[in-house]
Image (tube, helix red, strand yellow):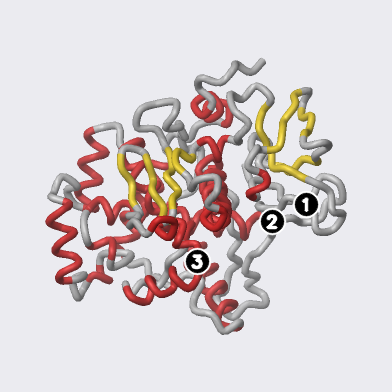
Amino acid sequence: MSSQPRCPHCRHFVYLDTLRCPNCEAEIGYHLPSREFQGLHHGQAVIDGEIWYACSNREWACNWLVWENAPAGRCFSCRLTRRSPASDDTVALEKLAKTEEAKRRLLLQLADLGLPIVGWDVQKGGLGFDLISSLSDGQRVTIGHANGIITIDLAESLDDRREALRVKLGEPYRTILGHLRHEVGHYYQNVLLTEPALWDRCRELFGDERASYRDALQRHYKLGAPADWHESFISEYATMHPWEDFAETFAHYLHITGTLQTAAVIGIHLDAAVTNLRDTDVVPLGSYEGEPIQRLLTDWEWMSQGFNRINRSMGFGDLYPFTIVAPVRHKLAFIHDIVTRAPLSPREQYALATAGDAERP
């Protein structure tokens, strides 16, 4: 199921974070189950006979809707935030709004892929987010994942700070959405690998995650990545430990499928009759669930070249500044397999996500 980012009143295109239509100025809210925007009247909308309200965090730019029988006035995405800045820390809350926007985009993609999303408040080890700022009190905030909880430093939403870290660490790409996709990879490694055979295959590809993480961390920051890292890994950071290799590869799978889905929804494709890139058309799909990894990666190879050329025309670096070598293709194939082997239906996803809520009719 793909998003329908159009105003329900004038049908003008709107971005996924839109609160008010830029064309007709109507107040709108995003309804996750239908993947559509709905018009708001006095802060609410009636959808299939049920009342949905604007999220109580709308003043902080959240445009998702909340079902009338939900246990709180916050939308599903906001409920997954376990920790956030104090209510009087307005500077940090402004940064929170940008990070929450990226989180909603992440959750929408996870839902489209049919992945289970069980909240930290529903199940021990469930997915949750601590979104806090190192600039609030000067305390260090370590971006990471532990027992289902993803921690993000809101200071990373500052472009100059994030860019300085990117250059210092020698990274070709660093964004809040990238952080979220990486950290959620750690979460899904434990969620999706449910059989010993899957863990065995995972260890063959990525290495044994039972190796000491502390030792690997110290070694990585002392010696750096091996000189030949690009022959087997998607990034230098992926070389640090098998956990990080899996998470980096999972994040790239989300980068690739998310960008191809967007291209498909807005009708971008490569026409062999006019392009000088290749001799046959490339038409990206909204979903690659029933497709082999070869189709996914071939589409991405050519589409990403086109995107990179567009970025360079604007004076920017490559949109996708990575090279997918054969060992990484095998790792991505494994991710593709575990993600698409048994996607949940929207109804099954809803039952998991709202466990403990009032039962829907």
Q: Please report the residue visible at 37 percent of the width from the left and 48 percent of the height from the top.
A: 185
| Residue that numbered label 3 is attached to | 158
The picture quadrant where one finds residue 197 is top left
Mark 2 lies on a secondary structure that is loop
Q: Amino acid at mark 3?
A: Leu
Please identify, in this view, whether the residue under mark 2 or under mark 3 is nearer the observer: 3
Amino acid type at mark 2: Tyr
CA gap, disc 1 and disc 2: 10 Å
310 vs 13, nearest the viewer: 13
Which callout, 1 or 2, points to the residue nearer the camera?
1
How far apart are the two marked residues, 2 and 3, measured between alpha carbons? 21 Å
Residue 90: x %, y % from top left: 57, 54
The residue identified by callout 1 is: 20
Question: Which mark is on residue 15?
Answer: 2
Q: Residue 290: x percent and y percent?
A: 50, 43
Amino acid type for the residue under numbered disc 1: Arg
Q: Is residue 9 left or right of residue 234?
A: right
Whether residue 269 is visible, yes or no, is yes
Residue sitting nearer the eye, 308 or 239: 239
Residue 250: where, in percent of width, then height?
38, 52
Structural distance between the alpha carbons of marks 1 and 3: 25 Å
Decide if residue 295 is in sight here: no
| Label 1 close to label 2 by CB (< 8 Å) | no
Relative vertical location of residue 358 with respect to residue 158 in this rendering, above or below? above
Residue 254's tag is: none
Residue 235 in picture, x, y percent from top left: 32, 66
